């Protein structure tokens, strides 16, 4: 049944995309807003019906809940609304999908459609709005028909959207958990949040990487904890960690410079029963203006996950970061502005430092970095590595397979921090040879199996050393190697010995002698030819 419903949901998404294409908005910059917002409106509409049926016996399976709702007076409706869970959007009786469907024959229907969405946004702003760093509110919905250039097509566009939504219902799957909704969410945004190859706030983390990070961090039960991502994107990492902890046991905090990504993260939170964390979603520049603060300064978090952009031109605000008030946060320094190719400024080095600074005294973190960070000898990188080791904060380095990200050739590794570890060893996992390579579009991508993921996770959690795969290394040895975090240099070199008989040895020796004699003869022949050629072009006088 679940697979059937998954397919039906994906078909709905495809149908909505087709509507956009039919009205000239295919691959348009506003298509993502139309698809995600109409999907969310439908989801909220059906969630309201689902919750009403749970709290009032008048809403029976035999009668459409919208019809029952129309027969309830205003006073009763207010009382019902107060009994609804806080994570359920409040829709008035004339804001339901069925009501809109019945109004399609009226003039200026697109205006009614837009007004309905805007009114729902305003009614639910306190719970469902994302904030900017300056405290401005980004509400749920836009007036979607505004994106249709031809005024004569606006009504037809609004009707087409409503007609795609009305014959579909989410009600049967609200009891499903993370795995179902993560699949749906990934399909919903797959054309709008692809890995941007390092572009700020558009970095997409593969699920395999997300799951590995989450399972390593959450190795024991936790309650009332905070989870933070300073470069959250659409929230893949956050959702995986929240799922491991339990959605009711944690609060999500995030910041991201991209308004599009913050909107997608909000949708992800709604789908995954984390509505209570939406007020903690901030759209803004984490490095320049970190938004989550306490009386003592920046807020400290129990869990931090991040796949920050690796390289980006941040020269416009670079000097603003290089200030005394950021001296402790950016202890290793701020990357300089290069004379050429400013797009390659290593902004991830600032995120690593910010994460170290934002970790609580009992906190853990998992950060994706370019593998080059592990061995970089100049600049900021070795200073960061030295502090990670000396402070006994670094507990694990996992080198991932090539092409784990489909659209970038950058090799990546995962760093694991633990404020309470206080150990004198770092555990290295070399997973570069795991996985199978598949074609994805015009690129190759490495896919990890469930067994591959489990091997990585269990090796670290159980500290299982495997030849050429995993090993514990003393901090003192890492220091002697200039704080290099390249796992390969810490593995013992394997020398394989093969026993052979005296007869086999004689045969090998004879073959080697013949090979050497043949090479010697060819050498003499070549010398003779060279002498002949030289005499021809430079005859003796």
Image: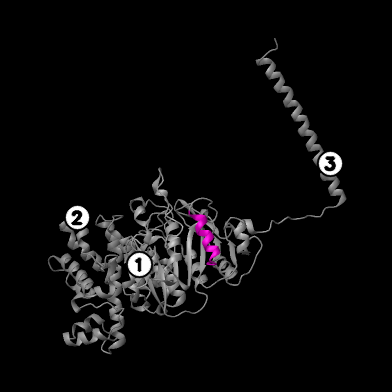
- Which region of the structure is painted magenta? 380-393
How many residues crowd mark 2 within 10 Å: few (<14), some (14–19), many (20+)?
few
Which percent across, then down, holds residue 115? 17, 69
Q: Does the magenta stretch include residue 463?
A: no
Residue 307 visible in image: no
Question: Disc 1 designates what residue?
Answer: 265
Work out which quarter of the rendered image holds the N terminus and state it. bottom left
Between circles 3 and 1, the one closer to the viewer is 1
How many residues crowd mark 1 within 10 Å: few (<14), some (14–19), many (20+)?
many
SS assignment for the magenta stretch, majority: helix
Question: Disc 2 designates what residue?
Answer: 149
Q: Is residue 533 left or right of residue 88?
A: right
User: Within the image, what quadrant is residue 301 found in?
Assistant: bottom left
Which percent across, then down, holds residue 259? 30, 61
Q: Is residue 343 left or right of residue 392?
A: left
Q: How far apart are marks 1 and 2 (CA)?
A: 28 Å
User: Within the image, what quadrant is residue 434 found in?
Assistant: bottom right
User: Within the image, what quadrant is residue 231 found in?
Assistant: bottom left
Mark 1 / mark 2, whichever is N-terminal? 2
């Amino acid at each position: 049944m679940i697979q059937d419903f998954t397919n039906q949901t994906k078909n709905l998404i495809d149908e909505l995309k087709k509507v956009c294409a039919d009205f000239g908005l295919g691959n348009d910059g506003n298509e993502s807003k139309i698809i995600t917002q109409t999907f969310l409106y439908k989801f909220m509409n059906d969630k309201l019906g689902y919750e009403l049926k749970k709290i009032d016996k008048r809403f029976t399976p035999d009668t459409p809940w919208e019809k029952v709702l129309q027969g309830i007076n205003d006073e009763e409706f207010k009382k019902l609304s107060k009994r609804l869970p806080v994570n359920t959007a409040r829709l008035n009786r004339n804001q339901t999908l069925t009501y809109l469907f019945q109004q399609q024959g009226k003039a200026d229907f697109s205006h009614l459609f837009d007004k309905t969405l805007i009114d729902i946004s305003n009614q639910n702003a306190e719970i469902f709005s994302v904030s900017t760093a300056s405290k401005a509110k980004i509400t749920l919905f836009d007036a979607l028909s505004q994106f249709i250039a031809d005024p004569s097509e606006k009504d037809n566009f609004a009707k087409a959207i409503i007609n795609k939504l009305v014959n579909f219902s989410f009600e049967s799957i609200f009891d499903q958990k993370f795995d179902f909704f993560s699949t749906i969410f990934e399909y919903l945004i797959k054309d709008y949040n692809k890995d941007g190859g390092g572009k700020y706030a558009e970095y997409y983390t593969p699920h395999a990487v997300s799951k590995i990070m989450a399972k390593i961090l959450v190795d024991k039960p936790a309650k009332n904890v905070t989870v933070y991502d300073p470069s959250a994107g659409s929230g893949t990492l956050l959702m995986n960690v929240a799922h491991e902890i339990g959605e009711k046991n944690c609060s999500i905090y995030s910041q991201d410079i991209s308004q599009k990504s913050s909107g997608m993260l909000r949708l992800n939170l709604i789908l995954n029963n984390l509505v209570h964390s939406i007020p903690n979603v901030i759209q803004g520049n984490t490095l320049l203006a970190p938004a989550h603060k306490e009386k003592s300064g920046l807020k400290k978090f129990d869990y931090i996950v991040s796949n920050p952009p690796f390289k980006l031109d941040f020269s416009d605000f670079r000097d603003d970061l290089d200030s005394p008030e950021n001296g402790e946060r950016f202890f290793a320094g701020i990357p300089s502005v290069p004379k050429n190719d400013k797009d390659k400024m290593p902004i991830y080095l600032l995120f690593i430092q910010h994460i170290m600074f934002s970790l609580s005294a009992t906190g853990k973190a998992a950060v994706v970095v370019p593998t080059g960070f592990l061995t970089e000898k100049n600049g900021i990188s070795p200073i960061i590595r030295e502090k990670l080791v000396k402070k006994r904060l670094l507990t694990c380095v996992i080198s991932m397979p090539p092409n784990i990200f489909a659209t970038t050739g950058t090799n990546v590794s995962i760093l694991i921090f633990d404020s309470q570890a206080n150990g004198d060893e770092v555990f290295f996992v070399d997973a570069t040879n795991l996985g199978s390579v598949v074609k994805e579009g015009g690129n190759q991508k490495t896919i990890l199996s469930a067994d591959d993921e489990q091997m990585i996770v269990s090796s670290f959690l159980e500290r299982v050393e495997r030849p050429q795969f995993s090993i514990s290394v003393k901090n003192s040895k890492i220091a002697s190697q200039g704080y290099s975090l390249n796992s390969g240099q810490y593995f013992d070199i394997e020398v394989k010995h093969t026993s052979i008989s005296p007869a086999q040895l004689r045969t090998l020796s004879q073959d080697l002698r013949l090979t050497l004699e043949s090479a010697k003869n060819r050498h003499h022949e070549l010398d003779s030819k060279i002498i002949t050629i030289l005499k021809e072009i430079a005859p003796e006088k």
